[in-house]
Amino acid sequence: MSSGPLLAVEGLNAYYGRAHVLQDVSFELGEQAVAIVGRNGMGKTTLCAAIMGIKPPSVSGSVRFEGTELVGKSSHRIASLGIGYVPQGRRLFPSLSVDEHLRMVSGRNGGSRWTAARVYELFPRLAERKRNGGAQLSGGEQQMLAIGRALMLDPKLLIMDEPSEGLAPAIIEMLIETFRMLEQEGLRILLIEQNLGVATSLADRQLVMVGGEIAAETTAKQLADDPELQRRYLGVEPVAH
């Protein structure tokens, strides 16, 4: 295992045709969770796709995970190295049951600490709904399943793209507590999030993305306490304390 950062992104560029979406993005993630915040259309989801090897963006630059270069590798190979991905919109199969979603990825990384039984222990609501199809679940249940599916690969790093999107406040609070518990168990988190309350609750390091670039690096407290910073970079009113 490399002694350097868990994830190192350096000079990352991504294009959709001629559109230059990511522009020389560089950052590192080690023991500390990192949140990347920004408005819609700033390149956050493209960043996830570039890290995970998801087409179509054309990518140049470097993404290293435990010292292993990811650029040019297939998505399934990247996932097998120990990166779990929870995409924006969950991307579940409507006709597959909760249990089928979990069994579909069971054993992909041999000897995984995560089993369907452990996911059901983490999210008891999923155990109650295990025979229901993806389309029959509430938004919160779908997000639990998307997270559980990613955990079944026993990742060292969990990348989550807008996990709080469309969820009720009570569900968001439950997920925040779950993520904190997983982090205490050693899971590292890269969070892509528009909800400042969620971003600042889960990560002290805050990277602000504007126009496909990392425009600023700050801390959760500085971002939460600086209304002008929030307005300038994020176009939002201050988060409530």
Image: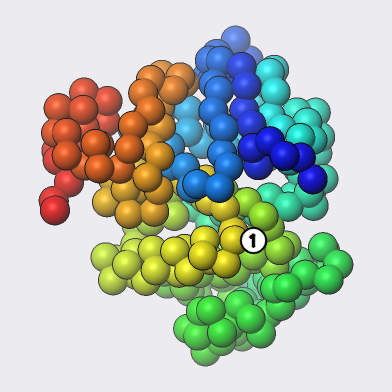
Rendered-image quadrant of the N terminus = top right
Toward the bottom, the furthest residue is 128
Residue at horizontal 71 percent and vertical 32 percent from the top: 64
What is the secondary structure assignment of the residue under circle 1?
helix
Residue marked by disc 1: 150
Indicate how the structure is coloured in the image: rainbow
Residue at horizontal 48 percent and vertical 28 percent from the top: 43
Residue 106 lies, with reference to residue 5, above or below; the image says below
Q: In the image, residue 108 lies at what x, y percent?
A: 82, 63
Asked if residue 118 lies left or right of residue 27, the reply is: right
Residue 132 lies, with reference to residue 230, above or below; the image says below
Residue at horizontal 59 percent and vertical 61 percent from the top: 186
Q: How many marks?
A: 1
Sort mark 1 into few (<14), some (14-19) or many (20+) by Cα contacts within 10 Å: many
Query: Quick one: 191 or 206, which is closer to the camera?
Result: 206
Which quadrant holds residue 39? top left
Toward the top, the furthest residue is 18
Toward the front, the furthest residue is 3
Query: Quick one: 2 or 61, which is closer to the camera?
Result: 2
As shown in the figure, which amino acid type bears the numbered disc 1? Ala
Which quadrant holds residue 163? bottom left
Q: In the image, residue 23 lies at what x, y percent?
A: 53, 15
Q: In the image, residue 235 lies at what x, y percent?
A: 21, 30
Residue 120 lies, with reference to residue 29, above or below; the image says below
Quick check: can you spot residue 15?
Answer: no
Quick check: can you spot residue 221?
Answer: yes
Asked if residue 28 lies left or right of residue 41, the reply is: right
Q: In the image, residue 228 lies at what x, y percent?
A: 14, 27
